[in-house]
């Protein structure tokens, strides 16, 4: 357990804050995580902090479609209803690599995995309506474009280009999903959590030169704490004022107009079709 020490502390602070808030209100929380060791440690901490023991850990590796399907099966077979789905997990600017299914890693984990997961849980969420789907995107979407001709960036992989594409995909997915769910009582929200002190930079840190590390250190110092970083996700998940709003993008607990390419309904529809075909949903 020793070497998990610091990392787990960070994990708990990052991911537990939001869950603790929900738990205090009496919710049952399913933590879907890829690292069971860290997840169980965090779950124990959350149970203590919230005084609500109703937290379960389930295995989910978003880089594996079979894992997504297994989680869906487990949830639909064991749970009576699902009121809030928060798609938070993500990877940023990792070296070129592929998911189990051969998709470019950032597009696969940040968009295709959550796309399949969300779609497979929709029936349950409709039955649980009013219910909400929260998709954690980023201001990085502003620099993104969807490279429909080479969506896996096989020809020209660039870490940043890939991350920005995946975060743009998050906003477009939320927009198209909201349209499709109109009238069902299931509402959809995408958001930028802020610049938050987390482990998200794990893949870029080793690539930085000394002067870049100094700048990075300054950014980290000025960044939001994990607690602050969780606020917009919590807001979208539970604020009653948003009950009849769907498909919008939020930042600092307020709606924000996303970049023009994130308001392109034709691209949103096209991305949906491409994604559905990639994950085998027809
Ligand atoms: N931090 C920021 O400044 C910032 C800014 C804008 C947007 N965001 C967004 O906020 C979200 C949360 O990021 P964070 O900042 O909290 O980063 P983080 O500390 O790195 O947390 C990301 C989480 O995603 C999980 N994850 C990664 N790959 C996964 C996979 N294949 N299957 C299942 N889980 C996986 C990680 O699991 P492990 O614990 O097992 O590694 C980790 O728990 C991301 O969507 C990110 O794009 C963050
Ligand atoms: C769901 O996962 C839990 C924890 O791993 C396990 O105990 C349970 O048997 C699973 N249920 C189904 C139906 O797969
Ligand atoms: C949402 O719509 C319902 C039904 O029309 C209404 O009763 C409720 O007051 C509305 N809530 C908000 C926050 O607008």
Image (cartoon, rainbow, N blue to C red):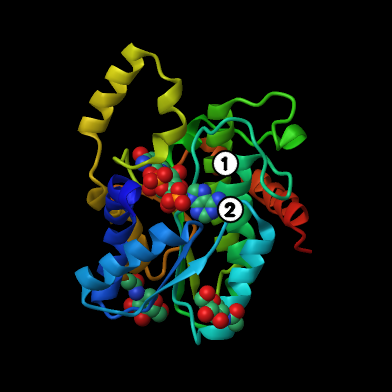
Q: In terms of image quarters, where does ligand 2 lie?
A: bottom right
Rendering quarter of residue 240: bottom left
Mark in the foreground, 1 or 2:
1
| Residue at image location 26% in from the left, 78% down from the top | 52
Residue 249's spot in the image, x, y percent? 43, 50
Residue 213's spot in the image, x, y percent? 32, 20
**On the rendered image, what quadrant is the C terminus found in?**
bottom right
Secondary element type, mark 1: helix
Report crowding for label 2: few under 14, some 14 to 19, many 20 or more residues within 10 A (C-alpha): many
**Do the numbered discs 1 and 2 sit on residues whose CB atoms are within 8 Å?**
no
The numbered dot on residue 173 is 2
| Residue at image location 50% in from the left, 72% down from the top | 186
Circle 1 residue: 166
Q: Residue furthest bottom?
A: 80
The relative height of residue 156 versus residue 202 in the rendered view (above or below) is above
Residue placed most toward the observer, 139 or 11: 11
Residue placed most toward the observer, 12 or 269: 12
Classify residue 187 as left or right of residue 152: left
| Residue at image location 63% in from the left, 47% down from the top | 108
Mark 1–mark 2 Cα distance, whole angstroms, equals 10 Å
The relative height of residue 142 versus residue 270 in the rendered view (above or below) is above
CB of mark 1 near ligand 1 (< 8 Å): yes
Residue placed most toward the observer, 180 or 36: 36
| Residue at image location 45% in from the left, 41% down from the top | 258
Classify residue 118 as left or right of residue 223: right
Residue 109's spot in the image, x, y percent? 58, 48
Secondary element type, mark 2: helix
**On the rendered image, what quadrant is the N terminus found in?**
bottom left
């Amino acid at each position: 357990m020793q070497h998990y020490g610091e990392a787990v502390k960070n994990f708990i602070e990052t991911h537990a804050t939001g869950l603790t808030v929900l738990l205090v209100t009496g919710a049952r929380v399913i933590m879907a995580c890829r690292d069971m060791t860290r997840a169980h440690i965090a779950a124990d901490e959350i149970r203590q902090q919230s005084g609500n023991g109703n937290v379960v850990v389930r295995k989910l590796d978003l880089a594996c479609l079979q894992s997504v399907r297994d989680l869906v099966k487990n949830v639909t077979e064991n749970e009576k209803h699902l009121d809030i789905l928060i798609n938070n997990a993500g990877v940023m600017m990792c070296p070129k690599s592929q998911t189990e299914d051969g998709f470019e890693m950032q597009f696969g984990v940040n968009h295709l995995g959550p796309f399949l997961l969300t779609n497979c849980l929709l029936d349950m969420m409709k039955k649980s309506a009013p219910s909400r789907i929260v998709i954690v995107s980023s201001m990085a979407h502003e620099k993104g474009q969807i490279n429909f001709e080479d969506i896996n960036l096989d020809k020209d992989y660039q870490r940043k280009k890939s991350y920005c594409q995946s975060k743009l995909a998050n906003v477009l997915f939320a927009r198209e999903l909201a349209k499709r769910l109109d009238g069902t009582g299931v509402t959809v929200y995408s958001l930028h959590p802020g610049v938050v002190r987390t482990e998200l930079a794990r893949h870029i840190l080793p690539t930085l030169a000394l002067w870049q590390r100094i700048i990075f250190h300054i950014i980290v110092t000025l960044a939001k704490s994990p607690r602050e970083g969780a606020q917009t996700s919590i807001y979208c998940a539970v604020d009653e004022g948003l009950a009849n709003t769907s498909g919008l993008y939020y930042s600092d607990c307020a709606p924000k107009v996303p970049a023009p390419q994130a308001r392109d309904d034709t691209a949103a529809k096209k991305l949906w079709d491409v994604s559905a075909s990639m994950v085998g949903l027809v």
